[in-house]
Structure formats: C-alpha cells, structure tokens
Amino acid sequence: MYARYKSHQDATLSYMEDTLHRFDTFKDVFFLGLAGKKAKAKANALRTELVKKRKVDEEINDGTWTPSKKRREMNAWRDNISHEIDIFKELYANFNFQKIHLMSHWA
C-alpha cells in the first residue's frame, strides 16, 4: 500500500520498513502450506513409516489392551503422527519468493 504513494517522506519510508518487518516476524504461519513437492513426498514417506510403527505397536499389544485403552492409544498415535508431520514440513518449507524479497528494496 505504501509503495503506491506518488511521493515519500522519511515517515512513509519508515512505515514501509516497519510493515515489512512485522510481516517478516509473523510469516512462519504460512510455512506449513509452503512445503515443496520434495518435502511433501518426504513427509508422506515419514507418515507411512510412522503408521507402520503404529501397526506393529497395535499388533504387539492387541491382546492386552481394553477397547478404551486401544482407542486412547490410537488417538495418541494419530496426534503424534500429525505433530511429527507438521514439524517435518516446517523444517523443510521455505519462504523464498522473489517478490517477497523485492519488497525489502523498495524503501
């Protein structure tokens, strides 16, 4: 918005820099959706591996778990798998967009 001004003063330039800094501070919320194809493929492979471990754990303890215990364990596994996948995507996501970097030069 500030870049569209026809002329600038020191105040408007500092507003531009402040706005970009605030965006840079909070851009992490977009990371989960920005995982590339390779990161998503690796995340799917990780999910498959974790599901296999869950199935082994379920088979080992199948005779000893009550239905409520089994339900709690499966919910815990599901939450753990989702959490691990989110962390993995955060690690491999990037925010390397040329248009975003270009804004740092406007002021």
Image: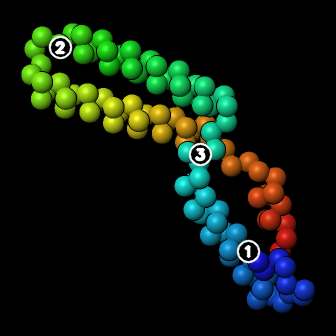
Quadrant hosting residue 21: bottom right
Secondary structure category for the residue under label 3: helix
At horizontal 66% and vertical 28% (from top left) the residue drawn is 38
Gap between marks 3 and 1 measured at Cα:
26 Å
Position of residue 54 in the picture relative to residue 14 (left or right): left
Q: Which mark is residue 53?
A: none
Secondary structure category for the residue under label 1: helix
Q: Which mark is residue 61?
A: 2
Residue 46: % across, % down:
49, 23
The numbered mark, 1 or 2, whose residue comes first in the sequence reads 1
Tell me, what colour scheme is on the image? Answer: rainbow
At horizontal 59% and vertical 52% (from top left) the residue drawn is 30
Q: Are marks 1 and 2 in contact (CB under 8 Å)?
A: no
The numbered mark, 3 or 1, whose residue comes first in the sequence reads 1
Residue 73: % across, % down:
22, 28
Q: Nearer the viewer, mark 1 or mark 2?
A: 2
Most foreground residue, 91 or 59: 59
Quadrant hosting residue 10: bottom right
Gap between marks 3 and 2 measured at Cα:
36 Å
Position of residue 44 in the picture relative to residue 53 (left or right): right
Secondary structure category for the residue under label 2: helix
Amino acid type at mark 3: Gly
Residue placed under numbered mark 1 in the picture: 17
The numbered mark, 3 or 2, whose residue comes first in the sequence reads 3
Residue placed under numbered mark 3 in the picture: 33
Q: Residue furthest front?
A: 67
